[in-house]
Amino acid sequence: MRDLPEPIRPGTPRDSGGKGAIDIDGVSIVFGHGDAAHTAVETTSLRVEPGEFVCILGPSGCGKSTLLNAVAGYVTPHTGEVRVDDTPVRKPGPDRGMVFQQYSLLPWKTVRDNVAFGPLMAGASPTEAGAVANTFLNMVGLKKFGSRYPTELSGGMQQRVGIARALANYPSVLLMDEPFGALDAQTRLVMQENLLEIWRKFGITVMFVTHDVDEAVFLADRVLIMSAAPGRIIEDIRPALPRPRSTDMVALPPYIAARQQCHEVIRAESRRAFAEQNL
Ligand code: ADP
Ligand code: MG
């Protein structure tokens, strides 16, 4: 069950219990037309259960962002359909929060106003939206920074604002595209732990794109490995690590086993792609 922080958004808060199922059903994605047509994602099917934390892992250019963008509603599949809680995805919506690698905050607004923006657009009063923003800033450890401007914060802090902003709409699915890719290794570890804490509190479904095997194994219930371009999911690995996770678990045998399994799949896939290029 979800444990939404107080105060909850005014009106009827989204009943998120049991929500956040994602169905990717025979989806292929093609860019361009005619001779210029280019398949970014090959026919792919996948079911993500409510509250699961899945990582999409694959080499650069294999179609990870494209697949995520189809769930977000930014990209329309060529074939098949994406459904979130049985509703076909046709465009972006407040049930799906998105966090990008680039912090994409509004530089002319304070941190609090950046987070309050979604609730305001959804019809909350400025006072209510401000209260929601404070709640989520607190959750990501930035309670004291609401009056600052984004450029006054470090990269890690800006990304935490991005996460607070995505959560402020009470989405049932959080979509994250290499969100910690631009951060240094130390900050990244802290961010990963913080994200897992938020995920646990919130009970939200997370679909997290990364090209980093360690990040995927540390975070995920399921690591979904994509093939080289055009991408499709070729492996579904479930690291047998307990929750809550902590960084010292990287020495545990199940961590090492899952990591090795990922590397083996990736190695075999790279060899296959390389051989194909040389035909
Ligand atoms: P990844 O996120 O795994 O690095 P992407 O999903 O960004 O890969 O890209 C997959 C393929 O689709 C690449 O060949 C990329 O050039 C192409 N692509 C992505 N977005 C577009 C777009 N809007 N228009 C045309 N081609 C695109
Ligand atoms: Mg990408």
Image (cartoon, rainbow, N blue to C red):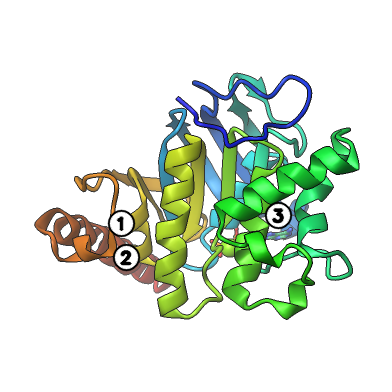
Is residue 126 visible from the viewing direction of this image? yes
Examine the image and state in which quarter residue 258 appears.
bottom left
As measured in the structure, the alpha-carbon distance from the residue carrying label 1 to the one carrying label 2 is 5 Å
Q: Which residue is mark 2?
A: 214
Residue 186, position in %: x, y?
A: 41, 78
Residue 117, position as x, y percentages in the image? 83, 49
The reply to whether discs 3 and 1 touch (Cβ–Cβ < 8 Å) is: no
Q: Nearer the viewer, residue 178 or 41?
A: 178
Question: What residue type is disc 3 on?
Answer: Ala
Residue, disc 1? 217
Q: Earlier in the sequence, mark 3 or mark 2?
A: 3
Q: Within the image, what quadrant is residue 257 found in? A: bottom left
Q: Is mark 2 within 8 Å of ligand 1?
A: no
Are the residues at dot 3 and dot 2 in contact (C-beta closer than 8 Å)? no
Residue in the image at 80% along x and 47% along y: 130
Type of residue at label 1?
Val
Instruction: Residue 224 in the image: state x and y as whole percent.
Output: 38, 48
Horizontal side, residue 150 vs residue 141: left or right: right
Q: Secondary structure at mark 2?
A: helix
Query: Looking at the image, which residue is at 86% across and 64% down?
Result: 109
Marking on residue 37: 3
The residue shown at (29%, 47%) is: 244
10 Å crowding of disc 1: few (<14), some (14-19), many (20+): many
Q: Is residue 124 left or right of residue 77?
A: right
Mark 3 vs mark 1, foreground winner is 1
